[in-house]
């Protein structure tokens, strides 16, 4: 038998520190990180406190108020962002290995994410040098221009499912616009963000422009969200934390963008090729073991193909190779943490208790290679009711529910029947109908006859409780700028308003 399990070359047994004001420093305590594939300790990371967050905020404040970064021309900043993109590419193998060791995802997915992260910097490097303002034809002798300016210090709190990519989505537009940043990665997956900080230092990014603080949300995230010295907070994570962050941001009315996940529907009409639809369904839910905010976690399937669709989903789900991210045969890796595995297994129990039918999975794979890792088999529930918790709540694991519809109206009602509105898809060969349905779905990211394709050029974010604002594309850049009108009077005369 050929050996398909490869060993990572990257060294993790080293010091992992916070990056504040251009320097790496300890934070006062250490956290053990675990390898999700084995459950074994991977390495230790320095973690900070409220004081570290405050120090980083002051460093970012100084870099914004007195430093060169916001004053640079867009062209100069653009050149810097291109260098960051090239450096990420140059370190792709190492970063991908770190991502897989730390987060568990298959190496091929990590490599893809690293390339995507580099391209996000490249996209904003290009965009920032393109025309952005307006000239407005106001009555003479005034002329008016509208310009975009950086907001200031941006706090950026990110989750564990796409560690470096989420850092790129936050940092690239913020830096392009001339802001300075305090980034807080998830306490579970900080390694690639720390490595990125080291790369930024090597590239001689002016000190304080990017700071990385490490620790749990309440300890170092909350002080960033609360600080009056922070002008904007951008958050990706759970609805519960997002709402808390919005409350914390009220003190100084800092600008807020929130990306809070979903329970996204994939509507399948019977005129579409069923095997292709099932193939997309697997991709929609099991990619990254379902730990994707836009995962297609609800299949909404037309009645006349419902049973056949389920049978095919079961057959294909059983064949998915679950295993360690460094095994070349692996198609789906472990979940990120013991806590997440427990949470997903709890949801599976909830589904059973609610009376849904467990069609396949719902358990952990058995065998030596799975011992102590955070694995869960691909899981399907049918016979669900719209008000069940497994239909309404984001599980963030390889668990899909399959709902049945009779009419187009019913499909739309089911698709829109949660508090979320992040993503959604429609599969039909009747493009008129597909377009009608996709327009009726209350979600920010939609696909017709496809799923998961994501572009740095296109806005990312949700309706309803999936969040506030949009990332990526021109919309993402706008989210990191203030808008200013400048009125110039070319012929100043006394206004004589008062005698
Ligand atoms: P998840 O349950 O998917 O981990 P969270 O919303 O808890 O999602 O976490 C996303 C990010 O928010 C992480 O970086 C986490 O440390 C941070 N976070 C969690 N709680 C808080 C909080 N009270 N204040 C600020 N940040 C927080």
Image (tube, rainbow, N blue to C red):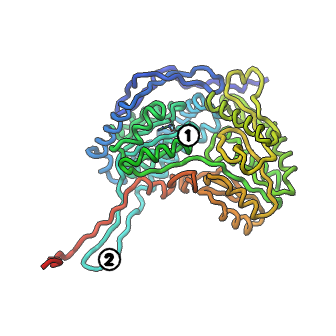
Q: Is residue 45 left or right of residue 181?
A: right
- Residue 298 visible: yes
Q: Is residue 269 above or below residue 159?
A: below
Q: Nearer the viewer, mark 1 or mark 2?
A: 2
In front of the other: 463 or 278? 463
Residue drawn at 48 percent across, 31 percent down? 216
Residue drawn at 44 percent across, 57 percent down? 478
Q: Position of residue 253 (x, y in %)?
A: 38, 51
Kindly identify which numbered label has been placed on residue 53.
Answer: none
Q: Which residue is mark 2?
A: 138
Quarter of the image where one finds residue 161:
top right
- Residue 76 visible: no
Q: Secondary structure at mark 2?
A: loop
Q: Which residue is mark 1?
A: 114
Quarter of the image where one finds residue 435:
bottom right
Q: Are marks 1 and 2 in contact (CB under 8 Å)?
A: no
Q: Position of residue 154 (x, y in %)?
A: 39, 45
Q: Quadrant of the C terminus?
A: bottom left
Residue drawn at 66 percent across, 52 percent down? 418
Marks 1/2: CA–CA distance: 47 Å
Question: Which of disc 2 and disc 1 is earlier in sequence?
Answer: 1
Q: Position of residue 20 (x, y in %)?
A: 36, 33
Q: Is residue 26 above or below residue 472?
A: above
Q: Secondary structure at mark 1?
A: helix
Q: Is residue 70 above or below residue 159?
A: below
Q: Is residue 164 left or right of residue 363?
A: left
Q: Residues within 10 Å of mark 2 (few under 14, many from 20)?
A: few
Q: Position of residue 386 (x, y in %)?
A: 73, 51
Q: Is residue 352 left or right of residue 112?
A: right
Q: Quadrant of the N terminus?
A: top right
In front of the other: 452 or 352? 352
């Amino acid at each position: 038998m050929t050996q398909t399990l490869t060993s990572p070359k990257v060294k993790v047994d080293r010091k992992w520190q916070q990056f504040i004001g251009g320097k790496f420093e300890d934070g006062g305590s250490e956290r053990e990180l675990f390898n999700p594939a084995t459950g074994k300790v991977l390495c230790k990371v320095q973690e900070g406190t409220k004081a570290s967050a405050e120090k980083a905020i002051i460093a970012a404040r100084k870099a914004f108020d007195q430093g060169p970064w916001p004053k640079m021309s867009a062209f100069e900043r653009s050149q810097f962002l291109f260098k960051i993109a090239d450096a990420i590419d140059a370190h792709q193998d190492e970063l991908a290995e770190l991502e897989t060791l730390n987060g568990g995802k298959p190496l091929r997915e990590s490599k893809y994410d690293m390339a995507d992260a580099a391209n996000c910097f490249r996209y904003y490097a290009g965009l920032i040098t393109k025309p952005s303002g307006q000239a407005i034809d106001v009555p003479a002798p005034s002329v008016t221009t509208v310009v975009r300016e950086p907001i200031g210090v941006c706090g950026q709190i990110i989750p564990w499912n796409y560690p470096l990519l989420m850092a790129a989505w936050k940092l690239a537009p913020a830096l392009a616009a001339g802001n300075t940043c305090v980034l807080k990665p998830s306490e579970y997956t900080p390694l690639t963000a720390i490595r990125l900080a080291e790369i930024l230092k090597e590239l001689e990014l002016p000190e304080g422009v990017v700071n990385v603080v490490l620790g749990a949300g309440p300890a170092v995230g909350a002080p960033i969200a609360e600080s009056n010295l922070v002008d904007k907070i951008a958050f990706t994570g759970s609805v519960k934390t997002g709402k808390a962050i919005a409350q914390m941001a009220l003190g100084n009315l800092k600008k807020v963008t929130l990306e809070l996940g979903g329970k996204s529907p994939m509507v399948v009409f019977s005129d579409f090729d069923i095997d292709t639809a099932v193939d997309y369904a697997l991709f929609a839910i099991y990619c990254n073991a379902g730990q994707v905010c836009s995962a297609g976690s609800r299949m909404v399937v037309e009645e006349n193909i419902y049973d056949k669709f389920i049978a095919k989903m079961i057959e294909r789900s059983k064949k998915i190779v679950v295993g360690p991210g460094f095994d070349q045969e692996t198609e789906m890796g472990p979940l990120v943490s013991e806590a997440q595995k427990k949470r997903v297994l709890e949801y599976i129990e909830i589904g059973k208790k609610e009376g849904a039918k467990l069609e396949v999975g719902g358990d952990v794979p058995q065998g030596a290679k799975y011992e102590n890792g955070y694995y869960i088999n691909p899981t399907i529930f049918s016979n669900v009711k719209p008000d069940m918790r497994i239909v309404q709540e984001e599980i963030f694991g390889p668990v899909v529910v399959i709902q049945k519809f009779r009419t187009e109206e019913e499909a739309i009602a089911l698709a829109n029947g949660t508090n979320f509105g992040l993503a959604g898809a429609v599969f039909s060969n009747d493009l008129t109908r597909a377009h009608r349905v996709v327009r009726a779905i209350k979600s920010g990211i939609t696909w017709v006859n496809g799923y998961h394709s994501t572009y740095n050029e296109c806005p990312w974010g949700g309706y309803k409780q999936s969040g506030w604002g949009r990332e990526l594309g021109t919309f993402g850049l706008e989210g990191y700028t203030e808008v200013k009108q400048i009125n110039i009077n070319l012929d100043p005369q006394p206004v004589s308003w008062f005698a």
